[in-house]
Image (tube, rainbow, N blue to C red):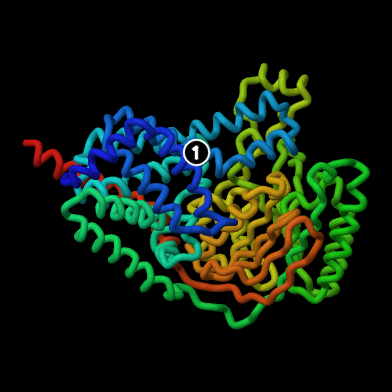
């Protein structure tokens, strides 16, 4: 490593005095890269600031700085967990705040581990450490965060690039390959500051950006000839009123009227749990609606919870009413939202404290896409769409993606905007349109290149109508899933470690 002596001393001085504070501030700025702010370059700059702080100090200190950065990033980016837990989930303040902080702290352990390993095993100022080992390590840990202990891949760096040329990498290797490009850019930026091979590192970064820009226009899939007119129905029933017994009748009538107003549509989609009653209770209502829709030739997709009479298990489901009737059950449940991984005595305490304690059951992993309105729909419910690889089995049969969600749990926070951006990456990865219906917004029709074709305003009852064509074909990501990014990360890290070992001999 060759750092200008004056600059090195100045950096070391700043880092020794204010390193933790600087890391925290850099992390606090990270959410500005994501929706609704959309300042995509901030992701690279925030990460570069952390990486620069790792250029001085011990592995242990690097871990603490990574933890501070993670606390800032996830506290600023996930503060809405408090709204979900306390405001709408009715968890008491003394429980909601520690739970939110616990999630933030757990998420912050990943950049902490990244800092420790980066400083411990590499010559941190070298070009290969900055533009090979670091981005590979970062992506591997992001991927692990996406599945370990149920997984929580929110704020993966790649989502911030939905409107940059780096999004062209999504159909190749998914969101994690885009994250790799962001981390690589941060490493190249730091290399310009500290490394004598800075121009070579910058050339590698430039090559990745040029490749992404060249890949972005590629179609991979082809449009079907016949367009489908779709209507996304957003009832905007407030979350704090939705499940009141006296609200059931008005809610059902609202959705019935909005559906009849879209009788000229081929497909009408309601949000997650739009019907605030179990399927067996709402059966007469749904049967009447189905009969009416058959007269106009409109197919329906309706979010509704259900109880399996054979097993007694509850499912978060959607029911499809077309030529035939189909069911889809949510596969990836929300911990402490839809199931509670706690022992029995804790459940008894939750019951006494009037806290939720009843589990939903997870649907089968092998559920096939559902045929409706001449299309084949790959369906996800709520934050299932955060798990891109979850959708891949059978996805080649699907012509459209559908996500039904209840973002009312997030209130008027940044979370619905972040969730919409995540959905856009799913469309980019598969080069298929995404139809996204939510209870209070943001409902949206997303094109195959991740562009928003139409969207609703939040907290207003409205229907979103558009004509859209399904698509056929396969992207590389649909074949390889996340494994391309993972294998690239493992190979890159292994190569750097072998080089470092050879030099040490």
- Among all residues in the image, which is located at the extreme bottom? 225
Q: Is residue 258 above or below residue 136?
A: below
- The total number of labels drawn is 1
- Among all residues in the image, which is located at the extreme top? 345
Q: Position of residue 355 (x, y in %)?
A: 74, 27
Q: Position of residue 253 (x, y in %)?
A: 90, 57
Residue 13's image quarter? top left
- Tell me: 475 left or right of 103: left
Please name the residue shown 45% across and 37% down the image: 24
Quadrant containing the N terminus is top left
Quadrant containing the C terminus is top left
Circle 1 — which element? helix
Please name the residue shown 50% across and 68% down the image: 431
Q: Nearer the viewer, residue 130 or 479?
A: 130
- Tell me: 354 left or right of 146: right
Residue 295 appears in view: yes
Q: Is residue 461 above or below residue 260?
A: above
Residue 198's image quarter? bottom left
Q: Position of residue 453 (x, y in %)?
A: 63, 71
Residue 488 appears in view: no
Q: Position of residue 65 (x, y in %)?
A: 38, 34
Q: Nearer the viewer, residue 35 or 302?
A: 35
- Tell me: 319 left or right of 254: left
Q: Which residue is mark 1?
A: 72
Characterize the local packing of mark 1: few (<14), some (14-19) or many (20 or more) Cα atoms within 10 angstroms: many
Q: Nearer the viewer, residue 22 or 368?
A: 22
């Amino acid at each position: 490593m060759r750092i200008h002596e004056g600059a090195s001393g100045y950096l070391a001085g700043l880092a020794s005095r204010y390193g933790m504070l600087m890391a925290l501030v850099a992390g606090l700025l990270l959410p500005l890269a994501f929706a609704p702010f959309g300042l995509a370059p901030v992701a690279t700059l925030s990460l570069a600031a952390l990486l620069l702080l790792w250029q001085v100090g011990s592995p242990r200190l690097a871990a603490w700085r990574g933890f501070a950065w993670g606390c800032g990033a996830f506290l600023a980016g996930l503060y809405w967990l408090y709204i979900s837990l306390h405001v709408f989930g009715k968890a008491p303040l003394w429980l909601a705040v520690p739970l939110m902080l616990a999630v933030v702290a757990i998420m912050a352990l990943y950049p902490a581990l990244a800092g420790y390993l980066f400083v411990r095993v590499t010559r941190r100022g070298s070009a290969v450490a900055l533009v090979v080992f670091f981005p590979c390590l970062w992506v591997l840990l992001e991927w692990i965060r996406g599945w370990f202990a149920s997984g929580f891949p929110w704020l993966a760096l790649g989502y911030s690039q939905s409107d940059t040329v780096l999004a062209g990498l999504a159909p190749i290797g998914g969101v994690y390959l885009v994250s790799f490009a962001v981390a690589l850019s941060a490493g190249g930026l730091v290399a310009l500051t500290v490394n004598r091979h800075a121009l070579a590192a910058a050339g590698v970064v430039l090559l990745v950006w040029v490749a992404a820009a060249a890949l972005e226009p590629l179609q991979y899939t082809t449009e079907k000839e016949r367009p489908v007119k779709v209507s996304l129905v957003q009832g905007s029933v407030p979350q704090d009123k939705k499940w009141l017994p006296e609200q059931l009748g008005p809610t059902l009538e609202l959705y019935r009227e909005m559906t009849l107003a879209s009788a000229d549509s081929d497909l009408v989609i309601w949000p997650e749990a739009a019907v605030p009653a179990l399927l067996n209770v709402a059966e007469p209502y749904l049967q009447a609606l189905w009969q009416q829709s058959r007269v106009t030739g409109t197919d329906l997709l309706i979010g509704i919870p259900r109880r399996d009479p054979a097993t007694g298990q509850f499912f978060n489901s959607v029911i499809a009413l077309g030529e035939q009737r189909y069911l889809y059950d949510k596969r990836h449940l929300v911990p402490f939202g839809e199931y509670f991984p706690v022992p029995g005595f804790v459940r008894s305490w939750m019951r006494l404290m009037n806290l939720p304690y009843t589990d939903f059951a997870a649907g089968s992993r092998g559920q096939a896409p559902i045929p409706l309105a001449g299309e084949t729909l790959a369906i996800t419910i709520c934050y299932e769409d955060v798990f891109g690889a979850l959708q891949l089995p059978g996805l080649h049969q699907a012509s459209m993606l559908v996500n039904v969600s209840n973002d009312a749990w997030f209130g008027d926070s940044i979370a619905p905007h972040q969730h919409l951006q995540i959905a856009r990456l799913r469309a980019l990865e598969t080069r298929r349109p995404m139809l996204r219906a939510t209870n209070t917004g943001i409902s949206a029709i997303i094109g195959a290149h991740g562009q928003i074709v139409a969207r609703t305003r939040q907290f207003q009852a409205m229907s979103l109508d558009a004509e859209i064509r399904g698509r056929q074909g396969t992207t590389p990501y649909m074949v390889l899933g996340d494994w391309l990014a993972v294998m690239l990360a493992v190979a890159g890290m292994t190569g750097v470690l072998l080089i470092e070992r050879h030099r040490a001999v």
